[in-house]
Each structure stands twice: as structure tokens, then as C-alpha cells.
Amino acid sequence: MSKAAVHALRAASVGVRMHQRWILEGVDVAIPQAAWTAIVGPNGAGKSTLLRALAGLQPLARGHVELLGQPLVQWGRRAKARQLAWLGQGEAVPTDLSSYDVAMLGRLPHQGWLATPSTADHAAVAQALHATHAWAWRERPLAQLSGGERQRVLLARALATQAPVLLMDEPLANLDPPHQSDWMATVRQRTAQGATAVSVLHELGIALQADRLIVMQAGRVLHQGATADAATRAALEAVFDHRIRVRWMEGGWMALLR
């Protein structure tokens, strides 16, 4: 890892081709450290594909991705897993595992082969389950949880990794508004401590609370920049055909239907 790395993640000329068509084409993004970046855009814009490409989970037809200043392909699997945590959509997790054991999966990159969890592992899992308000059902198997409860356990698994870079695809799925607010507070706390968060979001009101936005359309990046910049907000309105307008209300930016 380069100590002089300016960006947590960087994608250069990235192209992804599937079913004989380009899903991403000529994508360049630079994601700063210690900040929350939200990826937004209409359905089919390529948001989740870009996030998977940044995580090294999506084969590239062109271009390359860097993690903390080093080409992603040069990272060993375990070393990368200690630096980059992933929360995807509809992940397959054994539902007979307890919530505690699912969260403990996030500690695997830190453990030796067949090693038992250390005191540090248990502390990280407890901290993550408390942060996601999932500690109360730590002994219950995933099969007995609601969709929102399960999502909070999966988030705890990602947080337990304590990786400096956290990628989340639709992390608010099945969460009610109070727990969406809790999620934002957790992300803010992590970035204040120096971590980097990148999330694909459909909830524009929440995305507008991020430090930066990547606005996508038809497999390309239309704009990337600070949420506070007028050009960023204009790009967000444009990508939704000006059917929304972004306004400052009650201490924050909000997306309103026209």
C-alpha cells in the first residue's frame, strides 16, 4: 500500500462488456480517502456494475482500478480483504448461522487458517453489532430475522472487518427511516475516523447528505464532485430529466419532485 496515496480508489478508462454490449464505457473516477461518496443515477445507469468493478468483483474489458495507490490486481486476496470490505445486494449467507457468527465472518481476513477468534475479533464483532443495533438478536439465526434485521447484521459483518475502505450496494434495502438515519450516523462516524465509504443509493435525499456524488447515466460518469457544489446538484437534476429539483431545506439538501 502506498502511504502517499491520495485516493482510496481510482478507476481509469474502465469498460465492462456483458452480453455483447457495453455496461460501462470510458469510466474514470477518483474517490478520496476519509469521505463518503454516493453513486447515483437512474435505473440501468451502471451504478452497481461500477461498484463491483471498484471492488474487483467485476471483470474489466478495458482499463484498471487502483486501491490505495496500488493496482487492484496486485493485491493478494487476504490483503485486499483487510483493506476493502463489501456489502452487496442479496448476498447468499447460510441462514442457519447466528447473527453473531455471520458478523464474525467479517473477521476472517484477520485470522489464520483454522484459527479460533481472538479477543480483538470478538471486540470488533461486538462493536459492529452494537453500531447496527443488532446486538439484541446476536444469538438468533438469520432465518428468524426480518429483511431489515438481516440487512443490519450483514452491515455489521462488513463493519467488523474494520477495513479502511467500505463499499456498499443499496445498503438501505429493507431499512425503515430510523435505521436509515442510524446507517448515516455510522458512515459519518467511520469517515470521521479516517475510513472511506462508497455507496450506491436510490434514496436521493440520503445520497445528498454524502460528501461527494458520482452521477451516472447510460454506463458513463456524467459528473463527480462535492455535493456542496452547484454543478453537482445541477448534474443530478439533469440526469433525472429535470423531474426533480434539489433544494436546501431544514439544514440539508433534499430532492423534490417537480
Image (cartoon, helix red, strand yellow):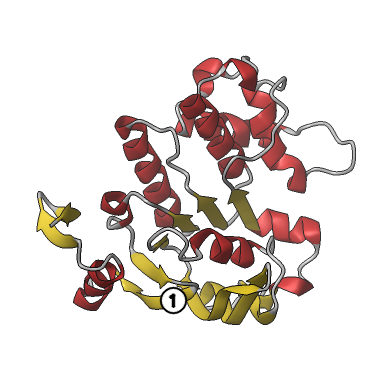
Residue located beneath label 1 in the image: 221
- Horizontally, residue 206 falls left or right of residue 9, namely left
**Which quarter shows the N terminus?**
bottom right
Q: Where is residue 125 shown, x and y percent of the image? A: 61, 33
Q: What residue is drawn where x is 44% and y is 76%?
A: 221
**Which quarter shows the C terminus?**
bottom left
Outermost residue toward the right in this view: 114
Q: What residue is drawn where x is 55% and y is 36%?
A: 156
Between 71 and 3, the one lying in front of the other is 71
The answer to whether one can see residue 80 in this image is yes
Between 56 and 107, the one lying in front of the other is 56
Q: Quadrant of residue 39?
A: bottom left
Q: Where is residue 148 shown, x and y percent of the image? A: 46, 28
Q: Is residue 86 above or below residue 144?
A: below
Q: Quadrant of residue 216?
A: bottom left
Q: Is residue 11 above or below residue 114?
A: below
Number of residues whose C-alpha sits closer than 10 Å to that of mark 1, classed few (under 14), some (14–19) or many (20 or more): many
Q: What residue is drawn where x is 38% and y is 77%?
A: 222
Between 187 and 25, the one lying in front of the other is 25
Q: Is residue 240 above or below residue 160?
A: below
Q: Where is residue 14 shown, x and y percent of the image? A: 60, 79
- Horizontally, residue 41 falls left or right of residue 144, namely left
Q: Quadrant of residue 120?
A: top right
Amino acid found under the numbered disc labelled 1 = Val
- Circle 1: element type: strand
